[in-house]
Image (cartoon, coloured by chain):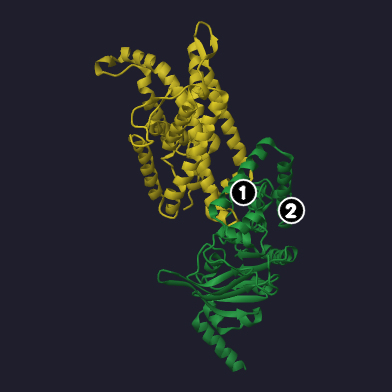
Amino acid sequence: MNDLIQHLINGLAAGTIYALVALGYTMVYGVLKLINFAHGDVMMVGVYMGYATAGHLGREHQSTFLGATLVFLLSMAGCGLLGFLIERLAYRPLRDKSRLTSLITAIGISFTLSYGFQLDIGFLPGASPRAFPEIIKPHEWIVIGDHDVIIWNWQVISFLIAILLMLGLQILVFRTRFGRAMRAVSFDHRIAALMGIPVDRVIAFTFMLGSALAAGAGILYAIKDTAVQPLMGLYVGLKAFVAAVIGGIGHVPGAVAGAILLGLTEEFVVGYAGDVLRGLGAVLHLDSLGVGFTGSSWRDAVAFGFLIIVLLVRPEGIFGRVTAEKV
Amino acid sequence: MNLVPGEPLLHAKSVSIQFGGLRALTDFNLEIHKGDLKGLIGPNGAGKTTAFNVLTGVYRPTSGDVFVSGNRINGRKPHQINRLGVARTFQNIRLFKELTAIDNVKVACLSESYSVVRRETLDRLERGTSALWFTNALHALNNYVDWWRALLLTPGFLREEAEVTKKAEGLLETMGLLHRRDEEARNLPYGEQRRLEIARALATNPKVLLLDEPAAGMNTREKADLMVLIRELREKFSLGILVIEHDMKLVMGICEHITVLDHGETIAAGGPAEVRTNPKVIEAYLGESFAAAHAAAAGSGA
């Protein structure tokens, strides 16, 4: 029972972080119908910005409330700018070309960032992982029983930050003038333009917003993982993309639901798949085949297996609406 | 706005547009003044909708100029042209289908008051020479402050929301759609969708309204109502209106001036009576042989 509670808590904490990244995919898809594969790498750059800021603040200041806030705000602002530049320089010139062109450009930017950051020249950090500074000093917030269930302070804080950012986004999209413009652009950007909506500007702001959220999420992820490395954007980004597709890409609450579902599933796989497999292995004599029995090695397989099942059974995602194609 | 009296709200001066080898529009001229109700007709593929697309900035003219209230708009973005006062509807209805009727109208009310830097100031800056990044930054500031106002539900935010809602409701009422306020646009009957498009276009505070086949798919009764409505809109919002229409009866009934296009060329322009008897128009609509017979009949009759 305690195990279960612990896994639920860990799963929720991981899921909310995925959700923040997934929102970036879903928003950009919403306005541009583009899968921005560089999104995860923008997140990685954000983490390095946080790493640099924390480094400048020094060990003493980085873990104060003000210092941690500064780390978050600066990297979110920096990433917002990066998102703006990527859209302006890479995607906007291709807006009228076929969608495949933008998609390949997105993959190109993704690789430029993730492999560019592995260089060891100038400010670039090099390939080796580094310890992310403890901007939130970890301590056990709630302990149940004899360390059966532990809720860490950073889990609570990151959960709250993620929830606040998502609420803010929800209000922005559904209550403000900009949100109304954004939704209009996502429905039909040509018509939106003819109704006086500055489409280019709306798209640019959407990129900035998604990138800023990604930076926030990246730092939360780095706090959880305690490490930062140039390839983290690829795998975290890919997971978040899976979450967005599971929830129904282009759908804001769907992305959150998909991400939490994915976070919980991964956590349960890590926790229980080992036992299940060992049980199965004993019955089917799988040990002779060399099948691994540790749950964590099955985590990604299950995440992507989940994606395949969703795509087979309900390709529009859990919350996505079936769009009838007019013939 | 330094509006010279007598200067047209919308003015196309020998506009031509060419797609590759195809001349979609040749030497097109048009003036819309305040209070005008003009028609644009022609057989299918004559270039009517192309003309609308040039006037609203969807296409850029290959040669010739378009002016809105004296501002040359060649190469301006559609949203900028809309801000200058040109709004339109579409031949194939292009509503935001999954939004409610009122939200469709509210989306187009974006021009209402801005929180930090006023809309008019921004429009002027954008038209002027100041750097684009500067106006963009001011827009970003507006959006940011707006967001906080929405988060904190400040009295100013609530008041503005109420104003926008009131304006949108007023427009729905004018178009006889208030009872459909909260229905999704795609669930409205065809005729009401067309009227909702007009309401949405009016929400952008236009000076000139371009209607692309507003009566398409309507029955005779609905068409008659629409004719009355279009005239009312002209008075109520002091608009200049340009209508594309296939239904000759409708066009002849309400338009004081009609331009006839065929293969992108203006084959006739003038009052309804004048256009109706123009042999070129008859030929374009009914074919050459019919025109010849008609001319012969007219000749022997004289």
- Horizontal and vertical percent position of residue A40: 43, 36
Image-quadrant location for residue B175: bottom right
Image-quadrant location for residue B34: bottom right
- CA distance separating discs 1 and 2: 21 Å
Rendered position, A178 above or below B17: above
Chain bearing tag 2 is: B
Q: Which mark is residue B187?
A: 1
**Residue drawn at (41%, 40%) of the image:** A38
Rendered position, B92 above or below B254: above
Seen from the viewer's position, the closer of residues A169 and A12 is A169
Of callouts 1 and 2, the N-terminal one: 2
Helix or strand or loop: what does disc 2 sit on?
A: helix
Q: Residue furthest left?
A: A288
Q: Amino acid at mark 1?
A: Asn
Helix or strand or loop: what does disc 1 sit on?
A: helix
Q: Which residue is mark 2?
A: B170
**Quadrant in which the N terminus of chain B appears:** bottom right
- Horizontal and vertical percent position of residue B289: 50, 83
Total numbered badges shown on the rendered structure: 2
Q: Is residue A325 left or right of residue B231?
A: left
Give the letter of the green chain: B
**Residue drawn at (49%, 15%) of the image:** A6
Neighbourhood count class around disc 2 (C-alpha, 10 Å): few under 14, some 14–19, many 20 upward? some
Pointers 1 and 2 in contact (C-beta within 8 Å) = no
Seen from the viewer's position, the closer of residues A236 and B26 is A236
Rendered position, A142 above or below A81: above
Q: Residue furthest top?
A: A146
Seen from the viewer's position, the closer of residues B72 and A26 is B72
- Horizontal and vertical percent position of residue A32: 48, 47
Per the rendering, the colour in which chain A appears is yellow
Q: Is residue A151 left or right of residue A174?
A: left
Q: Which mark is residue A168?
A: none
